[in-house]
Amino acid sequence: MIERKKSDSNPSLDEIWLSTDDRLFVEGDVARNLYLVKKGSLAVYSEKDGAVIATLNQGDCFGEQAVLAGGCRGASVRATSDVCCLEIPADSFKATIDSLSPFARTFLNALLLELATHNAIKTRETSDLKATEPVIDIQVDEISRGFDRYELKSLLVSSEHKFSAAQALLLRIASSTELNTTFISRDQDLQTHFDRGQGLVITQGLVEIDSPSGPVRLGPGAVIGLSGGLAQLKSTPMCKILKTVNGLLIPTDKARSELLSLKKGLCNIQKRYLSYLRSQIGSCLPRDQNEMMTDFEVKFWGTRGSYPYYSDSHKEIGGDTSSVEIRFDHDRIFIDGGTGLQYAEVSDGHDIVLLSHYHLDHIIGLPLFLTQKQRGAVTIGTALHDPSLTIEDRLKTIFGNVAFPVTLETIFASITLVPFKPNAPIKIGPWTINNQRLHHPGGAFGYRITHEQSDKSICYLADHEAGSELDISIERFAEKCDLIIWDGCYSDLVLPKVKGYGHSSWEEGVRFRERVGAKQLAISCHSHERSDEIARNIEKQLDRKTCFLARDRLLVQI
């Protein structure tokens, strides 16, 4: 017998109590609520054949697919033990979703649709479909016939439409202006999108993918590659184009940022349809229903070396010069202030910027960053200084002098300049910073960063030219770290022609990582000659389990 009572922990919500075999809702019911399991377990099953689609346990959230789609329940749910569920009204959940950015809403719809794709593949063996029939085939033109984009959007936010959950999700994604379209006729082009970490929403065409139960065909409405891209997986589904595909591309680095920035409560609500991805995307998801992942995040704001370079052939890597943000929970620290720094999110708190050296490509973003910062404080620190030429002296030879009209202090008054003792650790806030002299004209220092609440470390080695007496000490400095950010400006083929320029090759970075036993290598400081085509050729030669090319705005979890 089902009982309803006010929740003690949240009196504005109801608790639903069920006994074994009680049905909470039935396939086809109008979706007015979603639920969080507080106690017990439930089964999600098909009314058609009784097949169990999923099991739900304490902490799982369910019922959100139909709520978001504004439609009817796609499956039935019954208790398999004594159960208590917290009932969350659809309007409250929709208000939370509506408060997100347009891209975040589109991304979450795509994630839901990928779950539908996953479930369709999972239940393939028990369906009546022939092997040649697609498990998902939503003809957008047919179901949206008679509506323009604006009419369709209005209809989808109402409760009057008769679309299925999957149809409504696809229509919402297709009517969004947040994603780029693509046309794919060759298998290798599809694989290229996956290799670049892009998810695909199919709007027209037909593909065949490998699954545990054999080849499965997917038509319009299927989403593939999104979870793998979120996880930066090194293996992707094998796909074959059967009919030319039109689709929408989801940049998973941006999607990952949106996922990690969701409020904890929203992540809890999303937990069930994210949970099947947990084994694949690991640290991209919340650890449990009460906490967000607090491992390192590294955001590459700029990855180009020497000077900014923007062109149509360099869009994928990006054209901004070096700036990296390292985050742990609510703490963050920047290394270098190239042009990429101007795009960093504005903070009212205390920001720390480490400078590897004073060459213009590593500091020219500081004025724009400081212009946007209205409150708080900034610490600028470096190990590259001496008594006769302090940090202040060096910065004032550039800012407020020959290269820039005003000083940094004129732009933002609350700046503290901190000289580091070379080759000695220093603690600033929760961060411990070790430094190491690098081989670069005019001098430069690399940094090894740790956080007081983590045993992981990130090693930043740019700008640096390998092949000097410093090599041994630099190897000791980077030994066993979790991520090396490496100056891979050139290739081994080019390196002899640029000896003395102060930069290394990407191949030397790969060898260096192996020698020091680091877990991962990010190749950065790309030469202006490294186009997207050249970058893709380099990526084909990398072991993607341990090495990757850094790109502007790329966010990775360590």
Image (tube, grey):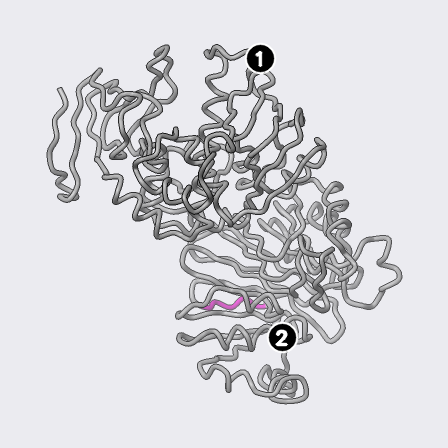
Identity of the amino acid at label 2?
A: Ile
527 up-or-down from 144: above or below: below
Does residue 182 appear to the left or right of 372 in the view shown? right
- Residue 425 inside the magenta-drawn segment: yes
Q: Which residue is drawn at 57% across and 75% down?
A: 366
- Residue 359 inside the magenta-drawn segment: no
Residue 558 visible in the snapshot:
no
Q: What element carries label 2?
A: loop
Q: Is the magenta stretch mostly helix, strand or loop?
A: strand
Residue 131 image label: 1
Q: Residues within 10 Å of mark 1 (few under 14, many from 20)?
A: few
Q: Nearer the viewer, residue 67 or 77?
A: 67
Highlighted magenta segment, given as a residue range:
424-428
Across and down, in percent, residue 380 comes to 53, 75
Where does label 2 land, which residue? 364
> Farthest right residue?
497
Q: Which of 86 and 430 is in front in this view?
A: 86
